[in-house]
Every structure is written in C-alpha cells, then in structure tokens.
Image (spheres, helix red, strand yellow):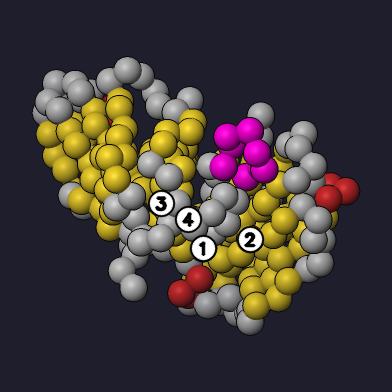
Amino acid sequence: DAGVIQSPRHEVTEMGQEVTLRCKPISGHDYLFWYRQTMMRGLELLIYFNNNVPIDDSGMPEDRFSAKMPNASFSTLKIQPSEPRDSAVYFCASSPSALTEQFFGPGTRLTVL
Amino acid sequence: AQKVTQAQTEISVVEKEDVTLDCVYETRDTTYYLFWYKQPPSGELVFLIRRNSFDEQNEISGRYSWNFQKSTSSFNFTITASQVVDSAVYFCALSVEGGGADGLTFGKGTHLIIQP
C-alpha cells in the first residue's frame, strides 16, 4: 500500500511567486490534514478536511494561504504570494477516521528566497 | 484550547542507558487522545502510540514503554537499553473529541541523542 504522497519534495522559489504543494492521501482515508513545521513554532496544524470538506482552517496563517480538496484523492495547499517567512517543511497527513493514528507524508521542504 | 509541553529540549545519553521523555498536556475535555511520534534525521513522522483518556494502563512494546497518569496530566515515554538508532526528535501530541478539533496539537519535541 502506498503511503501519503506529497510533491514536490523540495521547492525553492522567490518571494512573490505562487507556490502549490500537492498531497495524495491514503485511499479510503476520510480525513486529510496539512501541518507546517518550523524551528520557531514547531509543528502546527494549518487546516484539515473531512470527506473533502474543510472543517477547521483556523491555523491558516494569512489570506495568502489557501487549501482545496477537489476529490478524495487529491489536495493542494497554495501560497500566493509567497514570503521568506513561509519557508518551512509542510506535511500532509491522512487518517481513516477522527482521532485515530494519522499517517504522514514525507513532507515538502519549501524555501522562499 | 489544548496545550502539550515537552520541557526537555534535548537529551543526550550513552547507548544502553534507559531514558524517559516527559510530556505534560492541558485540556478541559474529558475525552481526548494522546500520541507519540518519532521524527528521525530523515525527516518523516512515524507513529508510535495512541492512548485514549479512559485507558490509563501502561503499555510496553519491546524496549518502549509509556506511562499515562491523568492525575498529573502526563504521558511519559521510556526507552530501555537505548540504541543509536533511537536518536531522533520525539513528539507528544494531543487530540480532543468533537468540536471540529480532530487535528493534533504537538509539543515542541525532545531531541534525543544516543551516543555510542
């Protein structure tokens, strides 16, 4: 069974550019989560979906961030325009139901110059 | 709001020593779940254990054991006879039932260094 797939694994971009991170959850999992990891703030929940519907986006830092889940097998996290402080590792995770183990993808390391 | 505190930023021990990683949590909910994840140098997050608030039994899995005490709001993790491969950052996390709060609240992590 394939785990959670994220792409790209590494992204380097310049300030002001649009960045799109992609995630494919494990098939059959109803929940999808986006987290951000930085040295200063640790691991933070940005947003999560249940059956493709956004449930809690209170962790999304600014309007520059947006996330979508058009179907059960794909989600995107977009930053437009990107800023250097957005540099972080972004993890996508999925789980079969609420409050169960979350399976994490390998992460996307984003560097904004 | 939920909070998880891992007071130990970094721990360094010599191989074969036992080591305990502390985790203290805060929540007003009566139904919640506690987790431990491991993040090795390669960067992925690996699930170790999940425990619900109604199950205070300690758990042992090989060299790993967990001590859950509701009275002190703690969920500590002990590695017995540590090995170099145990070197990683370990995160304690909390999730509560209902209210659209199914995401994990993580502690800041404890960087465990096992020296040969």
- Label 4 element class: strand
Q: Which residue is mark 4?
A: A95
Quarter location, residue A80 = top left
Residue at mark 4: chain: A
Residue A9: % across, % down: 21, 52
Does the magenta-highlighted stretch encompass residue B97?
yes
Marked residue chain, label 3: A
Instruction: Answer whether residue B18 is magenta in the image.
Output: no
Which residue is drawn at the image coordinates 23% and 45% (left, top)?
A22
Q: Nearer the viewer, residue B100 or B112?
A: B100
Residue holding disc 1: B47
Q: Chain of mark 1?
A: B
Q: Residue at x 63, y 33 (%)?
A: B99
Q: At x 78% / y 68%, what residue is drawn?
A: B58
Q: Identity of the amino acid at label 2?
A: Arg
What is the crowding at mark 2: few (fewer than 14 residues within 10 Å), some, or many (at least 20)? some
Q: Residue B44: in sight, yes or no?
A: no
Q: Is residue B9 left or right of residue A8?
A: right
Other-residue count near label 3 (Cα within 10 Å), few / some / many at <14 / 14–19 / ≥20 = many
The residue range painted magenta reads: B95-102
Which amino acid is tagged 4?
A: Ser
Tag 1 near tag 2, CB within 8 Å:
yes
Residue A93 tag number:
3
What amino acid is found at the position of numbered circle 1 in the picture? Phe
Mark 3 and mark 4 residues within 8 Å of each other at the beta carbon = yes
Q: Quadrant of the C terminus of chain A?
A: top left
Structural distance between the alpha carbons of marks 3 and 2: 16 Å
Real-space Cα separation, disc 1 to disc 2, in angstroms: 8 Å
Chain ID of residue with mark 2: B
